[in-house]
Image: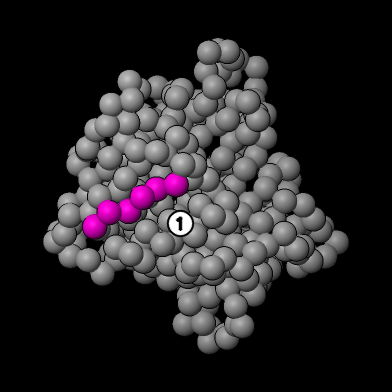
């Protein structure tokens, strides 16, 4: 099987629809050779490695062999069958911070790898809003642990120095937000956007009273608003982009999702991408040769 990647793969509607197409095309295949042709692909946004990493992992667990075809820096076509995410990282992430490269984390062994990422690795960026960013990411990871039916999640990120922006994506492939809510609390929604909106409102939760876990997507809105952040939530056929007026202190359940979209392909899970201004303390990375910070993590959550 051959799948041809586009020239540019971004975290936009077309990019999400393409990734959904890739998963839909491959998800029922077992013990097969799958070729991803990237010979004409010049750009992949680093945060999308969160999704591609999960897809590769799931396909390999079904006995498939994944190959990628891409051109090296000299234009020579190469076929790669191992360390694929690392190869994509090195190919499409021109500049990297050595302090925070991609790593694999397995919850069945220890949880302190996540603690290290949140309390040490992330701290090296010297963000002025470090504590709130840490809370936001902790909350997203906690929600994956609670809701991901596949018990697997991933996180990838980069800092675009040109835009002075930190972009982080947290992803799981399994149940959508709509499917999870309908199953847990027996609500029915007309579409995925309505389900996402429900999940963003205060007091709405699928958690039982005696069940520990994340605080909910409401707090994602609250803390992002306080640090002038943005968020895009993709689940099922819904793509909710919250860029402004997504939190009102006088009416916390007033949410503007006018920039949101119904996507043509079905995204089989949830992808949450947050963007915040890279506002750093004095002494943070200032080397003008560094254009981007890149991080890839993929973690398996214990059954």
* Residue 258 within the segment the image draws in magenta: no
Residues drawn in magenta: 1-6
Instruction: Assign the C terminus to one quadrant of the image.
Output: bottom left
Q: Position of residue 192 (x, y in %)?
A: 58, 73
In this rendering, is residue 6 above or below 185? above
| Numbered disc 1: secondary structure | helix
Q: Which residue is found at the position 45% from the left and 56% from the top?
A: 18
Q: Residue at x 66, y 69 (%)?
A: 197
Q: Nearer the viewer, residue 156 or 284?
A: 156
Which of 233/205 is in front?
A: 233
Give coordinates of residue 184: x percent, y percent: 48, 80
Up-down: is 169 above or below 23? above
203 left or right, relative to 211: right
Residue 298: x %, y % from top left: 35, 46
Locate residue 150: give its quadrant. Answer: bottom left
Q: Does the stretch in magenta take in 4?
A: yes
Residue labelled with disc 1: 18
Q: Nearer the viewer, residue 107 or 18?
A: 18
Q: Nearer the viewer, residue 235 or 252?
A: 235
Is residue 111 rendered to the left or right of residue 253? left
- Residue 144 in view in this figure: no
């Amino acid at each position: 099987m051959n799948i041809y990647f586009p020239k540019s793969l971004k975290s936009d509607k077309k990019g999400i629809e393409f990734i959904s197409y890739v998963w839909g095309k491959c998800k029922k295949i077992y013990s097969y050779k799958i070729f991803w042709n990237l010979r004409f692909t010049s750009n992949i946004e680093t945060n999308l490695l969160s999704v591609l990493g999960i897809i590769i992992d799931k396909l390999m667990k079904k006995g498939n062999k994944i190959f990628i075809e891409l051109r090296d820096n000299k234009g020579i076509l190469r076929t790669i069958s191992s360390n694929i995410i690392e190869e994509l990282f090195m190919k499409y992430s021109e500049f990297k911070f050595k302090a925070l490269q991609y790593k694999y984390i397995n919850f069945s062994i220890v949880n302190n790898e996540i603690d290290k990422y949140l309390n040490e690795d992330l701290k090296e960026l010297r963000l002025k809003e470090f504590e709130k960013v840490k809370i936001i990411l902790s909350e997203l990871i906690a929600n994956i642990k609670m809701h991901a039916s596949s018990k697997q999640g991933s996180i990838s990120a980069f800092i675009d120095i040109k835009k002075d922006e930190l972009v982080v994506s947290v992803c799981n492939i399994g149940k959508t937000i709509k499917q999870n809510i309908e199953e847990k609390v027996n609500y029915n929604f007309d579409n995925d956007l309505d389900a996402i909106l429900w999940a963003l409102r205060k007091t709405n939760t699928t958690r039982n009273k005696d069940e520990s876990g994340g605080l909910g997507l409401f707090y994602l809105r609250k803390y992002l608003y306080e640090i002038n952040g943005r968020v895009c939530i993709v689940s099922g056929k819904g793509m909710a982009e919250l860029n402004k007026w997504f939190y009102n202190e006088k009416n916390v359940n007033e949410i503007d999702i006018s920039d949101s979209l119904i996507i043509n392909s079905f995204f089989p899970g949830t992808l949450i991408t947050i963007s915040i201004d890279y506002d750093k303390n004095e002494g943070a990375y200032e080397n003008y040769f560094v254009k981007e910070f890149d991080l890839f993590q993929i973690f398996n959550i214990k059954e």
